[in-house]
Image (spheres, coloured by chain):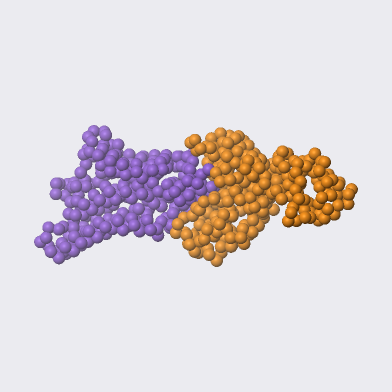
Chain colours: A purple, B orange
Amino acid sequence: MSLTAAFKEIFVFFFKQDVKSKRTKIFLFFSLIPVLILLIAKIVELNNPAADVLAAKIFSRVILVVYIQLLIPILALLFGSLIVNEEVDNKTLVFLTTSPIPKPAVILGKYAAYILLSAIIVNLGLLLCFLIVNISPSGQAPQVREFLSYLGVGTLALVTYTAFFTLLGTLFKKSMVLGILFIFGWENVVQYFPGTTQKFTIIHWIKSLLPAASDGGSFLRFLVFRLEPSSTAESLIVLMLFIAAALVASSLIFQNKEYLLSDTV
Amino acid sequence: MKPVIKAENLSKWYGNVLGISDISLEITPGIKGLLGPNGAGKSTFLKVISGQLKPNIGTITLRGEPVFSNQRLFSHTGFCPEHECYYKGNTGWQQVLFRAKLQGFSPKEAAEKAGFAISRVGLLESKDRLIREYSLGMKQRLKLAASIVHEPDILMLDEPLRGVDPLWRVNIIQIIKEYEKEGKTVIVASHILPEIEAMTNSIILIHQGKIFAQGDIQYIRSLMDSHPHMISVGCSQTRKLAGLMIDSDYITDIRFHQEDQQKVTFKTNKRDQFFDLLNRLIVEHDVEVTEITSPDDNLQAVFDYLIGR
């Protein structure tokens, strides 16, 4: 069976299977919590214009940060590390590895299915947030272009982080712990190191792609805080190469590594 | 006959734990029973020959090709693992259909193959039920359906009758025997002797990761000349027969049965010579024999002896 045909079968099967899974519903629920918060803020704002509750401010200062710096990496960690580990834990790996399909198709097909799923989850939440923020009786023009660029960067972050955590998952059984340390330790600390060191984080390259804050009062200022951003072109190239390298490495490892199920011997 | 599976000095261990050790054997078409107690290395051996594990030492070839990561080969093999392996939230049909699609069949062909496999294991009526609602026996049959959906030439079954009800045990044994009739190779691992006996008398005994013996039951017995065989003879003149036999060098023990006066049991360490002598004496002395049985001529006796119980 060719790589593309196997990729398609794996992608369709896992997307269909996971789109209705309990896990996806839970992830969707968590990603919609910020929407709910924003909705409440908007209702308060609309009913009491004098109150200091501005949905737009909450969106820019909290929600976007929650999405791009927290929700996306966590979602990527959960989905990425599951690609191999759930097959090992559920002992379904044998189902895939004894089929006449190229092993990389398993990694790439599941990766694509989970990317699509997580992108739907994240972007649906972000889109709802954006729509809520832009419910305005004054009829102000929504910042669609800026929002779309965030949506694109968010999706790219998802693709990058998931590729990295897929690699961790193919290498280590306890990749979830390492992933948490990476998100909350490495990424959150090293990105603020000056010089070249910050470039060893994913978030540095992601943030470099975000629209620059035009002034101190910009509603995206908090999120856009970047120490020494790299150029857009350089960031895009680095991220693309990183994604490709992580996926190739994951595929090669999966191709050659033997995974022991708990019943072995 | 050309071997389908060839293992040479095959060893596999997990850290300090030995899985299999220095296994060399050739498997030809037909049913082979892989027999051994739990932890003997049966599953490890099956995982190595099904390409899931790499041997640490030695080589394994299927149809002359190395196995590990040789995905092309897997269209000729079917593997039914011992453990449950299904995707939660899937129906039986979805599981088998997915397996058929992974074999490279077109959607129409895959549906036909899946339908045939599922009906073969008697799950056609329950095919749209969630697998998690299946009984253990049904899950076992579903695994079998998934492993035979592409009608492989080499079928590897790890404890295929575990949890299956008596009626379906017979049917599964029948399916396995049909594979043999088609000239295919089936390896069945089990720790339950009657299961293997019901399928084949060609066995491989494995214990502590090593092959103890292989061949049919009689061949294995012939390897064990020192192992005394029990042979019971039913006749009306048990004392006369015992008197005639007692001088033989082949007899190590004679027992009369208190509960059955018309039966005498001999213990011999030379079975073939014993039977030659018995036949001759029966004819020469006109002893009327009603039955001759060998109470320990089954797999259990061989197995117990070999593992030193």
**Image quarter in which the N terminus of chain B is found:** top right
Q: Could you tell whether A113 is left or right of B197 in the image?
A: left
The residue under the point 62% across, 62% down is B167
- Pick the residue in front: A14 or B270: B270
Viewer can see residue B131? yes
Which image quadrant: the C terminus of chain B? top right
Which corner quadrant of the image does residue A121 belong to?
A: bottom left
Identify whether B148 is placed above or below B7: below
Position of residue A263 measured from the top left corner of the image (x, y, whole percent): 50, 46
Q: Nearer the viewer, residue B162 or A127?
A: B162
Residue occupying image coordinates x 25% and y 56%? A34
Instruction: Kindly identify the residue that appears in the image at 27 percent across and 51 percent down.
Output: A67
Q: Which residue is situated farthest in the left direction here?
A: A50
In-front residue for pair B38/B89: B38
Q: Is residue A174 left or right of residue B72?
A: left
Relative depth, front residue between A153 and B23: B23
The image position of residue A124, as x and y in percent, is 30, 57
